[in-house]
Amino acid sequence: MGEPFKEKVQVVGVGEDGILSMSLKAMRLIQDAEILFGSERLLALFPNHDAKKILLQADLKEAVGIIRSNLGRRQMAVLAPGDPNFFGIGPELIAQLGKDGVEIFPNVSTMQLAFARIKEGWGDAYLGSVRNRPIEAIVEPVRAASKAGLLTDDRHTPAAVAQLLLQHGIEERRVYLFEEIGGGEERLTKTNLTHLIGKTFSPAGVMILLKGP
């Protein structure tokens, strides 16, 4: 790929279809990497890769240190789910390494996939996340939006989101809740906020709310 690719860490988005979701350019960047970062699930997609593999932790301090010490010396790639800039690792790496030290190759995000599944445009939607973020911040944006898409997790669950919105008088919403979207066990629940209370779903869900009963 040439020396210029060693000057920046390549942050490559991986879709829910794994390797099948990736462009030839993205695959080439990964194949040429001498150091490969990612979650256990994403690194497992490349079992025969010769690169040094480094498991990403929630705290990126160690990974950022390794990247800094190898910029300009070794080619590196970070595997990230979907679009790294959509509530993903992209902004944090840019903040730590600067824009000149990072190149981003996005894939389809789970949010984009969810809106496609229900055949709704999302250009006019409020898009947010409650993953590792204050859940209260979504209340007023969701109230004002005719469409909203939220990323949930095992702490701020769909049931917790529904309870919060109902407590604030937001009731008339149709809900499309995706679990394991894009995977072999993808599930869609069509419901409303009231019927989400007390229900348990898989972590890392995608929740779409449309105004109306």
Image (cartoon, rainbow, N blue to C red):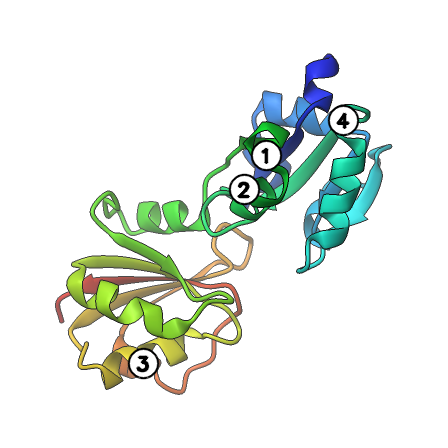
Q: Are marks 1 and 2 in contact (CB under 8 Å)?
A: yes
The disc, 4 or 1, on the residue closer to the chain's N-terminal end is: 1
Look at mark 4 in the image and give the residue it sits on: 75
Q: Specify the amino acid type for callout 1.
A: Leu
Pair 4/2: label in front: 4
Q: Quadrant of the C terminus?
A: bottom left
Q: Specify the amino acid type for callout 2.
A: Gly
Tell me how far mark 2 sits from mark 3, CA to CA: 31 Å
The disc, 4 or 2, on the residue closer to the chain's N-terminal end is: 2
The disc, 3 or 4, on the residue closer to the chain's N-terminal end is: 4
Residue count near mark 4 (Cα–Cα under 10 Å), binned few <14, some 14–19, many ≥20: many
Q: Specify the amino acid type for callout 3.
A: Leu
Q: Specify the amino acid type for callout 4.
A: Gln
Look at mark 1 in the image and give the residue it sits on: 20
Q: Quadrant of the N terminus?
A: top right
Tell me how far mark 1 sits from mark 2, CA to CA: 8 Å
On screen, residue 162 above or below 32: below
Look at mark 3 in the image and give the residue it sits on: 164
Residue at the location (68% across, 59% down)? 59
Tell me how far mark 1 sits from mark 3, CA to CA: 38 Å
- The percent coordinates of residue 132 (x first, y second) are 51, 67
Look at mark 2 in the image and give the residue it sits on: 15
Left or right side of 130 for 25: right
